[in-house]
Image (tube, grey):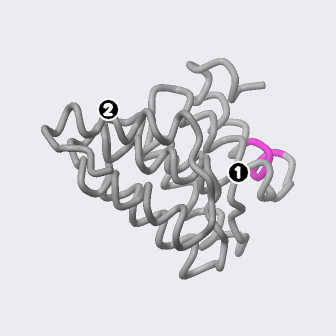
Amino acid sequence: ACEKGGGQWVRALALIEEMQKKHDIPPDVISYSAAISACEKGGGQWEYALGLLEEMQEVHGLKPSVITYNSAISACEKGGGKWELAIELLEEMQEKHGIAPDVFTYSAAISACEKGGQWERALELLEEMQNKHGVAPNEVSYSAAISACAKGGGTWKA
């Protein structure tokens, strides 16, 4: 419920803490993914999102899912185009956990590059998603790449 409200990311973080300290219930991947999503929807609270991602792995030994990474990458995108962090997460999910990115992962990373003025990197990701992973881009993927070219002064190569 907190992930849908936008401004309720603080409450989501409090619930993660409460379930552990007050009720001795360890959060699972779903709990953490929902809290990370709340941080993303709460205006791109990327610092908190990445803190939760680290906590779930280091403290609880949980393996993030593609949904967890999608939310964390989106938080980096919405948090002002933290494109370097978005790319690091994209690489980490594959190299550290063997998780294949999907169209949402790539669209969020491309959008982070667009917001960060990295049109060339956005186009590289658009190509990578198709050639390396066989992931078909959608309207969001293309729109973000096109917008990156427009903002970055790049030229589209057909």
Mostly what secondary structure, the magenta segment? helix
For the residues labelled 1 and 2, say whether their Cβ atoms are less than 8 Å apart.
Answer: no
Write the residue at 70% across / 75% down: 61
Q: Position of residue 86 (x, y in %)?
A: 41, 55
Q: Quadrant of the N terminus?
A: top right
Task: Residue 26 in the image: state x and y as whole percent.
Answer: 81, 59
Q: Which mark is residue 147?
A: 2
On screen, residue 129 versus residue 11, left or right, reads left
Q: Quadrant of residue 120?
A: bottom left
Mark pair 1, 2: CA separation: 32 Å
SS for tag 2? helix
Q: Which residues are magenta?
A: 18-22
Q: Residue at x 46, y 26 (%)?
A: 43
Circle 1 sits in a helix, a strand or a loop, which is it? helix
Badge 2 crowding class, 10 Å Cα cut-off, few under 14, some 14 to 19, many 20 or more, is: some
Where is residue 104 shown, x and y percent of the image? 61, 47
Decide: is 17 above or below 79: below
Residue 81 falls left or right of residue 26:
left
Find residue 151 and name its label: none
> In this view of the protein, which residue sits in the foreground, 107 or 145?
145
* Horizontal side of residue 103 vs 108, given as left or right: right
Closer-to-camera residue (22/9): 9
Closest to the observer, 47 or 104: 104
Q: Specify few, some or many for label 1: CA neighbours under 10 Å numbering under 14, 14-19, or 20 or more.
A: many
Of the residues shown, which amino acid type is indicated by label 1? Tyr
For the image, the number of numbered tags is 2
Mark 2 or mark 1, which is nearer the start of the sequence? 1
Asked whether 21 falls inside the magenta stretch, the response is yes
Question: Disc 1 designates what residue?
Answer: 32
User: Residue 100 versus residue 40: which sits nearer the camera?
Assistant: 100
